[in-house]
Image (cartoon, grey):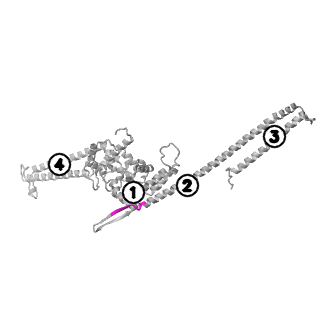
């Protein structure tokens, strides 16, 4: 097996070769200069002084001799001098380059050492803050009352993440609850320090110059943080439970959340792992989807459920009149498409209370995709709801009654004819067991007429429901209503927020 030849350059060998080359050039140059010096003198004496060894006393001859020697040797010496001057300058340039390279490597090494030291200092503070955050969790508590009909009420004190979980569940179970009031009354004393420490952790990541240094030097405005910043933020996020993240969700929507903190968690995508709550079977009150529009969508990063949420709520029309929207809600109720939410404490007596969070879709229809609510499959299911079925059943009962009455009329006529009774329409046939129930044929016909009138009224009710169904199907307001109901959003809250946001974004534009 042949060994691999190492072609990598060897600086020491190259430097030795360069020195040897210069020494050889110096030797050659010296020898050439000496050779030409001797050659010129020899030629002069051979041509002009051979056989005579006496020095001339004539100055002009010495001048001619000097001009001869100088005229020939000076250009040669000057050429050699220029050559070595250039060689010397080249050597100095090479040495300067090596010196600069050495200095640059020294600077790079120093910078690496400094960066490493800065990273170590950052990590030391970062992980110390994380430890402090975890320690502060132990100060959070929740007093849970245990009710038992056979025993006195007892109180269990929950700590840490269990306490936060119970606080979030407690808050979300109250559809009318306000986070600011709940937080100040039940959580501020225990969680204030916890939220402040978390803010300092995120602030440390966001402000760190050593972490920012890895942001690419480009004009791309979409790059708002470095990979290093994101890495440490994800470490911080990984230490949070789902209920801790939900606590941040609500806390950053009020004065305690701090607007700067809200901007930072949006920037780094704190809520990306947060499951959307509009289809959680164990939660009828959707507090996350009700307020999530108050955040920038980047806070959920690539979470597909939340992407779909922001895509759908963008279709809410805030120019709809309250009267039109309320009328649409009433039609949706009357046709059985929606039902009042079975949440304790909700009494829809005003339009604000008939907003999305107070209603839910009929459980028989497929409402996950609001674009297909009026599909043929759903229309069949809507017309198979108790509202329709009760009316249809009532018609069937009345038609059965008419059938029974007609049968009795036919029996009565047969009875009268068997006894050769004429003009029997006002007579009573002796074929019923109870005299009090006996009716004449005329009376029975009046009953049939009344029951048919009742059937006609019921059919008109069904026709009216069908017309209402067509009305809401064709209404442009229905889409807004469906989105509000699907995500439990209050129309008043949403429209007021969006209008105020538009006023901030476009101060000169009138809403």
How busy is the neighbourhood of tag 2: few (under 14 within 10 Å), some, or many (20 plus)?
A: few
Classify mark 3: helix, strand or loop.
helix
Q: Is residue 276 visible?
A: no
Residue most extreme to the bottom = 151
Determine the image quadrant of residue 79: top right
Identify the secondary structure beneath mark 1.
Answer: helix
- Alpha-carbon distance for marks 3 and 2? 60 Å
User: Which badge, 1 or 3, comes first in the chain's sequence?
Assistant: 3
Residue 278: horizontal and vertical position, in percent? 35, 52
* Residue 303 appears left or right of 5: left
In the displayed orientation, state which residue is furthest to the right.
51
Cα gap from disc 1 to disc 3, whole angstroms = 91 Å
Give the magenta range. 136-144
Q: Nearer the viewer, mark 1 or mark 3?
A: 1
Viewer-nearest of discs 1 and 4: 1
Which callout, 2 or 4, points to the residue nearer the camera?
2
Total tally of numbered discs in the picture: 4
Task: Look at the numbered disc 2 and give the secondary structure of its residue.
Answer: helix
Distance CA(mark 3)–CA(mark 4): 137 Å
User: Which numbered disc, 1 or 4, marks the residue that appears first in the sequence?
Assistant: 1
Q: Which residue is mark 3?
A: 33
Location of residue 322 (image quadrant): top left
Identify which residue, 276 or 154, lies in the foreground: 154
**Circle 2 sits on which residue?**
117
Percent across and percent down for residue 298 are 43, 48
Tell me how far mark 1 sits from mark 4, CA to CA: 66 Å
Mark 3 or mark 4, whichever is nearer to me? 3
Dot 2 or dot 1: first in sequence order is 2
Sequence-wise, the earlier of marks 3 and 2 is 3
**Place of residue 476 in the rendered image (x, y in percent of width and height, measured from the top left):** 31, 42
Disc 4 target residue: 454
Rounded to the nearest whole Å, what is the CA distance between mark 2 and mark 4?
90 Å
């Amino acid at each position: 097996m042949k060994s691999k030849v190492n072609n990598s350059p060897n600086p020491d060998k190259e430097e030795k070769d360069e020195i040897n080359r210069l020494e050889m050039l110096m030797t050659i140059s010296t020898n050439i200069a000496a050779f030409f010096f001797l050659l010129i003198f020899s030629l002069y004496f051979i041509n002009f002084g051979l056989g005579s060894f006496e020095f001339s006393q004539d100055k002009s001859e010495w001048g001619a001799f000097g001009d001869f020697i100088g005229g020939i040797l000076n250009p040669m010496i000057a050429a050699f001098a220029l050559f070595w001057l250039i060689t010397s300058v080249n050597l100095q340039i090479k040495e300067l380059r090596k010196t600069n390279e050495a200095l640059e490597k020294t600077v790079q090494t120093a910078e690496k050492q400094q960066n490493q030291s800065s990273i170590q200092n950052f990590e030391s503070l970062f992980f110390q803050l994380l430890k402090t955050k975890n320690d502060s969790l132990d100060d959070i508590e929740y007093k849970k009352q245990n009710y038992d009909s056979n025993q006195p009420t007892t109180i269990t004190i929950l700590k840490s993440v269990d306490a936060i979980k119970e606080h979030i569940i407690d808050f979300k179970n109250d559809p009318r609850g306000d986070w600011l009031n709940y937080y100040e009354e039940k959580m501020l004393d225990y969680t204030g320090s916890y939220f402040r420490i978390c803010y300092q952790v995120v602030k440390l990541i966001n402000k760190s110059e050593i972490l920012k240094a890895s942001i690419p030097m480009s004009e791309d405005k979409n790059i708002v943080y470095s990979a290093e910043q994101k890495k440490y933020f994800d470490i911080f996020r990984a230490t949070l439970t789902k209920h801790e993240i939900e606590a941040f969700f609500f806390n950053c929507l009020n004065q305690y959340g701090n607007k700067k903190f809200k901007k930072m968690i949006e920037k780094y995508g704190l809520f990306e792992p947060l499951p959307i709550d509009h289809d959680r079977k164990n939660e009828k009150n959707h507090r996350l989807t009700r307020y999530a529009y108050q955040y920038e969508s980047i806070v959920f990063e690539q979470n597909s459920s939340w992407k779909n949420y922001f895509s759908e709520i963008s279709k809410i029309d805030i120019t709809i009149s309250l009267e039109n929207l309320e009328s649409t809600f009433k039609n949706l109720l009357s046709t059985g498409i929606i039902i009042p939410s079975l949440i304790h404490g909700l009494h829809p007596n005003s339009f604000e209370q008939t907003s999305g969070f107070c209603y839910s879709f009929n459980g028989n229809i497929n409402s996950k995709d609001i674009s297909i609510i009026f599909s043929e499959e759903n229309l069949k299911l809507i017309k198979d709801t108790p509202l329709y079925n009760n009316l249809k059943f009532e018609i069937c009962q009345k038609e059965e009654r008419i059938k029974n009455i007609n049968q009795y009329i036919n029996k009565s006529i047969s009875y009268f004819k068997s006894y050769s009774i004429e003009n029997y329409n006002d007579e009573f046939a002796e074929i019923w067991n109870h005299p009090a129930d006996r009716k004449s044929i005329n009376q029975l016909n009046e009953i049939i007429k009344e029951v048919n009138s009742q059937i006609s009224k019921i059919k008109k009710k069904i026709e009216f429901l069908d017309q209402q169904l067509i009305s809401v199907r064709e209404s442009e307001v229905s889409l807004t209503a469906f989105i509000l109901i699907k995500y439990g959003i209050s129309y008043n809250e949403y429209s007021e927020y969006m209008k105020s946001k538009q006023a901030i974004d476009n101060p000169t534009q009138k809403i």
